[in-house]
Image (cartoon, rainbow, N blue to C red):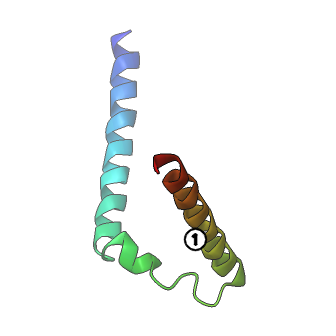
Amino acid sequence: MAANLEKRVDALERELRALKSAVRKNKSKGPWWERLAGAFKDDPFFDEMVEAGQKYRKASARRSNGRNS
């Protein structure tokens, strides 16, 4: 039983070291939002999604304003 527990703890410690290493590598690349900026430039599908979101928010605001009046 103790040997099994020791193996599991060793595996967890290896995984933790790997995760910490991955985090350090990502931090050295800068903030995630800076890496993502411009990723959808000239993407017509993304433009459609943005437009659909704007239409939804406007319609939602109109419905909300109608109820509160």
| SS state under label 1 | helix
Q: Quadrant of residue 10?
A: top left
Residue to which mark 1 is pinned:
54
User: Along the horizontal axis of the image, is 32 left or right of 50?
Assistant: left
Q: Quadrant of residue 2?
A: top left
Which residue is situated farthest in the bottom direction here? Answer: 42
Which residue occupies 35% across, 68% down?
Answer: 26
User: Along the horizontal axis of the image, is 50 left or right of 35?
Assistant: right
Query: How busy is the neighbourhood of tag 1: few (under 14 within 10 Å), some, or many (20 plus)?
Result: few
Q: Quadrant of residue 16?
A: top left
Which residue is situated farthest in the front direction here? Answer: 69
User: Along the horizontal axis of the image, is 8 left or right of 67?
Assistant: left
Which residue occupies 64% across, 80% down?
Answer: 47
How many discs mark residues in the rendered view?
A: 1
Please state the horizontal and vertical placement of residue 68, each as a whole percent of the image: 46, 48
Please state the horizontal and vertical placement of residue 37, each as a whole percent of the image: 45, 81
Which residue occupies 39% across, 35% down?
Answer: 11
Placement of 12 over or under 61, stated as above or below: above
Placement of 12 over or under 46, stated as above or below: above
- What is the quadrant of the N terminus in the image? top left
Placement of 57 over or under 31, stated as above or below: above
